[in-house]
């Protein structure tokens, strides 16, 4: 797997906002979210399946109940294919930026030390970082949003047998960035 390609999927990733793959897990998450303080606690999940591109599907619940895309961007708003900078949450009622640089750096470092299984050409890696909302970045319903999320980025990947290295091509890949934080709007 190509580390730069791999981290571009991370976009800080900010994980990179949607998981809800198992109904039991969804039911548990829903019951946890409903006990959160209204208007403050927020959970997000970002995910990408078989893509090293800069875009993720996003779901944000709690104080922000919305969905859309998360896209890695440079500070000037251009798409960042390397995922080294911000993550733009482009939701149905507005947008805001997360500072994904720390998450990306930690994820890249974890990948350099992660050894996959050479018999199956598969790898899994996980890491966590604090990811703040970029001040003044909110638009629409999220104008004035502030806060910080603790996000965990996880990747599971199976590489082709012919390359079976961290620079090889993958057969299948799932990247999930998920976590909670406290936000204020306005």
Image (cartoon, rainbow, N blue to C red):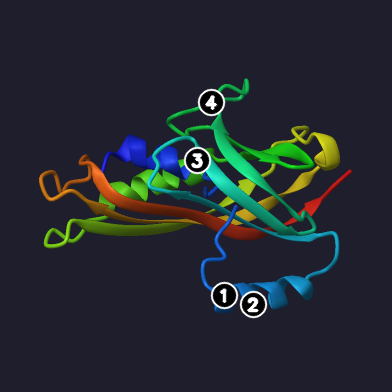
Mark 3 vs mark 2, CA separation in Å: 27 Å
Find residue 21 and report its horizontal and vertical position in percent: 52, 66
Q: Pointers 3 and 2 in contact (CB under 8 A)?
A: no
Out of 128 and 80, give the one closest to the viewer: 80
Mark 2 vs mark 1, CA separation in Å: 6 Å
Which numbered disc, 4 or 1, marks the residue closer to the eye? Answer: 1
Q: Pointers 4 and 3 in contact (CB under 8 A)?
A: no
Numbered circle sitting on residue 27: 2
Determine which residue is flagged by label 1. Answer: 23
Numbered circle sitting on residue 11: 3
Of mark 1 and mark 3, the one earlier in the sequence is 3
Which type of secondary structure does the marked residue at label 2 adopt? helix
Of mark 2 and mark 4, the one earlier in the sequence is 2
Q: Pointers 2 and 1 in contact (CB under 8 A)?
A: yes
Q: Is residue 172 left or right of residue 65?
A: left
Of mark 4 and mark 3, the one earlier in the sequence is 3
On screen, residue 136 above or below 146: above
Q: Is residue 152 left or right of residue 27?
A: left
Find residue 184 and report its horizontal and vertical position in percent: 83, 51
Which type of secondary structure does the marked residue at label 1 adopt? helix
Location of the C terminus by quadrant is top right
Of mark 3 and mark 2, the one earlier in the sequence is 3
Q: Residues within 10 Å of mark 1 (few under 14, many from 20)?
A: few
Going 84% across and 42% down the picture, which residue do you hit?
Answer: 141
Find residue 99 and report its horizontal and vertical position in percent: 60, 39
Determine which residue is flagged by label 4. Answer: 79
Which numbered disc, 1 or 3, marks the residue closer to the eye? Answer: 1
């Amino acid at each position: 797997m190509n580390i730069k390609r791999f981290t571009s999927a991370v976009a800080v990733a900010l994980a990179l906002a949607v998981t809800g793959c198992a109904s039991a897990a969804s039911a548990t998450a829903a019951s946890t979210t409903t006990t959160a303080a209204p208007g403050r606690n927020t959970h997000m999940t970002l995910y990408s399946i078989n893509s090293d591109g800069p875009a993720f599907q996003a779901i944000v619940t709690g104080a922000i109940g919305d969905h859309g895309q998360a896209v890695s961007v440079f500070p000037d708003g251009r798409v960042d294919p390397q995922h080294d900078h911000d993550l733009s949450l482009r939701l149905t009622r507005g947008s805001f930026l997360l500072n994904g640089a720390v998450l990306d750096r930690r994820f890249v470092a974890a990948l350099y030390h992660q050894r996959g299984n050479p018999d199956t050409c598969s790898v899994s890696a996980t890491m966590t970082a604090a990811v703040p909302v970029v001040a003044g970045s909110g638009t629409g319903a999220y104008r004035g949003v502030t806060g910080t999320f603790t996000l965990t980025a996880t990747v599971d990947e199976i590489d082709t047998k012919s390359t079976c290295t961290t620079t090889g091509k993958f057969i299948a890949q799932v990247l999930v960035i998920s976590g909670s934080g406290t936000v204020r709007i306005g």
